[in-house]
Structures are given as structure tokens and as C-alpha cells.
Image: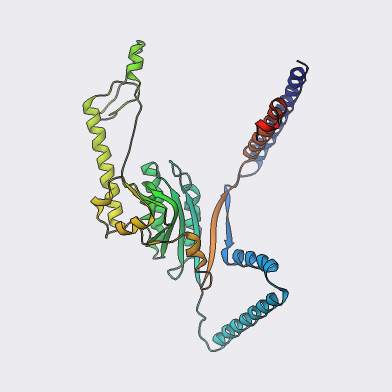
Amino acid sequence: MEFLSEYGLFLAKSITVIITVAVIVGIVASLGQKSKKHEKGHIEVVSLNETVTTMSEALATIVESADARKAVAKAKKKSDKAEQRSEKKALKSGSVPVAKKRVFVLDFHGDLRASAVDSFREEITTVLTQASSEDEVVVRLESGGGMVPSYGLAASQLDRIKKRNIPLTVCIDKVAASGGYMMACVADRILAAPFAVIGSIGVVAQIPNVHRLLKKHDVDIELMTAGKYKRTLTMVGENTEEGRKKFREELEETHDLFKAFVGEHRPGLDIEDIATGEVWYGAPAIKKGLVDDTKTSDEYLTGQLDNADVYTVAYVQKKSLSEKFGFALENSGDRFLLRWLRRLMGPAQVS
């Protein structure tokens, strides 16, 4: 009882402090938003060449001798000087040095609503200000699909790259199914890890119906529409066979559009053979023509480091002060709950 009394007093004090701080932060955030326009986000660019070099040098300091490291550094210095001399010689002779290929890497992790498209469109817009037909865009794609309009928009963003005649490669390390494959098929080349899941060229829709439950409890639902097919299936009303038929027709129409889209971008496919809603792993997907090669994104990108400058491009959205504060409160609440459970139950039962 003494513990519960102490805990109750402590909890009351904690809640009071949290509410007070929340109110103060809310007022400050509100005033800040009025006086300063909120920036949505910014672009972050990281050189994969420099990242890999830094990691390699860090490992070399441990596994290589000092003499070996000096020899490597000396050879690199000599190579850099030779490259600089070559560039100067080319400029003096009036010839233009051959520009090194650039590879711009974007990431797309899709949910049901393809929410990542908001950042994705900003990244593509940024890349298109610099990329040329001599460069390449690589998209590391991961998605099990979702809503048709959302993934249609995401696929259209990739098509912006194709319309500029910039080579586009999509790498699939885990899954690109349904709407995910709708995006992937836009690329000039599709690479997939050996056990990545590919395909699911189909359409699915399901709607729960509680009409019989409501009817059992004498609950009436009045559904009024203008237009014969304004509502085909409903969650609470009584569904008719005519409505079901129309709904199936609409699904088939969507599926036909999906098949036409994939067939347009992958003309070598036997579309009727693969548009069954089935999925395949990497190697079998090659036989079906869904992908062009089995290779992880890491293997593909690191293989280009010697001949290209590789950059990862990401649009990072800024969180508002209230969002940051809410996250902090959530974390502090989790830590508080964990400490209380450990005290109550013992550390062995809560990890």
C-alpha cells in the first residue's frame, strides 16, 4: 500500500509537470509559426565513393601494417597527380576532359498509400536539375503495393526520368509486388536479389459488411444515392448481386489497365502468363521476363565506384516543434513505464 501511495503521488506530479511543459511548448510553437514560415524539408546528398573510402581506411588502420598503408597512400597520391596532369594537358590542348559518369541513388519504401511519393517527387525534381543522358538514376525500391492512384503517381514520377532520356535502373532487394512492380517496370533495367519477391500483377479489394448484424439488432440504414452505380457495395447496407457484378467489372477494368501499363513498359513479357496475381523470386522472375538480372543493390552500386561518382539523394522532411516534443514525450513515457514495471515485477520479466 505504501508503494502504491508513493507511486500515485509521483504519477500526479509527473502528469502535472508534463501538462505544464506541453502547454508552454504549444504556446512557443504557435508564436514561432506565426512569425516564421515553416520550411518543409531539405535535400541531403552523400557521396558513396567517399563513404566507402572512409570505411576502407578505417579498416585498413586495424588490419594492415603501417608500411602497407604508406605504400597505398603513396600510390594513390601518385595516381591523383597523374590524373591532374592529364586534365591540365587536355585543357592546354583545347580538348574537353571526359566527364566522369554520375550515378544518383534514390530510395523508395512504399506503404499502402505510397506515402513516400511526397519526398520522392522532390528528390526526382532535384536530380533532374543536374542529371544528363550520360548519367544514371538508380532507385532502390521496396514495396508490396497498395492503392492504385497512389502507385500510379509514383510510377509517373519515374517516367519523368525516362522522358529526359536518363538511364533508369531499379534495384529490388526484398520485394516489389503489385503497385511496387508497377513502379519497377518503368525502368530501363530491373535488378533483383535472388530471393526478392516480384510480381503480383493483380487487383484485390475487400469490404466488410455488417448488414446482418445490424438487422439482427433492428438497426436500419438508409443509403440514398443519385446515379445507378454511385454505390455498388456498402459496409452497412444490404449488397445486391447487381452491385457485386458491377464491382467485379470495375476490378477487371483496373486489372486490364495494370496489364496494359506493364505490357507497354516490358513489351517482351507474356502478359497473360504473368498477370495472374502470382509472385516469383529473383531467378524464376528472370525466366518470366519480369527482371533482367539477379544482383543486390550493394553489388551493383559498389561495382560502379571505380568508374563513376555515386551519390545518394534524399529529401528529409523537417519535423515541427510539436512533433519533436510529442516524440520525446512518447520515449520518456516508455522509459517511465519500463522502470515502473521493472520495480513492480522484477527486472527478469521485462526486457
Which residue is painted at 61% across and 43% down in the image?
319
Residue nearest the viewer, comparing 53 with 44: 53
Q: Is residue 221 visible?
A: no
Q: How many labels, in total? A: 0
- Residue 2 placement (x, y as % from top left): 78, 17
- Residue 160 placement (x, y as % from top left): 40, 58
Left or right position of 42 against 70: left
Residue nearest the viewer, comparing 147 with 21: 147
Which residue is painted at 47% across and 51% down in the image?
108
Q: What's the colour scheme?
A: rainbow
Q: Is residue 53 visible?
A: yes
Q: Is residue 128 above or below residue 319?
A: below
Is the N terminus in the top left, top right, bottom left or bottom right quadrant?
Answer: top right
- Residue 248 placement (x, y as % from top left): 25, 35
Instruction: Give the quarter of the image for residue 71.
Output: bottom right
- Residue 265 placement (x, y as % from top left): 31, 57
Which residue is painted at 28% across and 51% down in the image?
274
Q: Is residue 74 above or below residue 154?
A: below
Instruction: Give the quarter of the image for residue 172.
Output: bottom left
Left or right position of 9 against 252: right
Instruction: Give the quarter of the image for residue 29.
Output: top right
Residue nearest the viewer, comparing 242 with 31: 242
Residue that protrudes farthest toward the bottom in the picture: 93
Is the C terminus in the top left, top right, bottom left or bottom right quadrant?
Answer: top right
Q: Is residue 132 above or below residue 343?
A: below
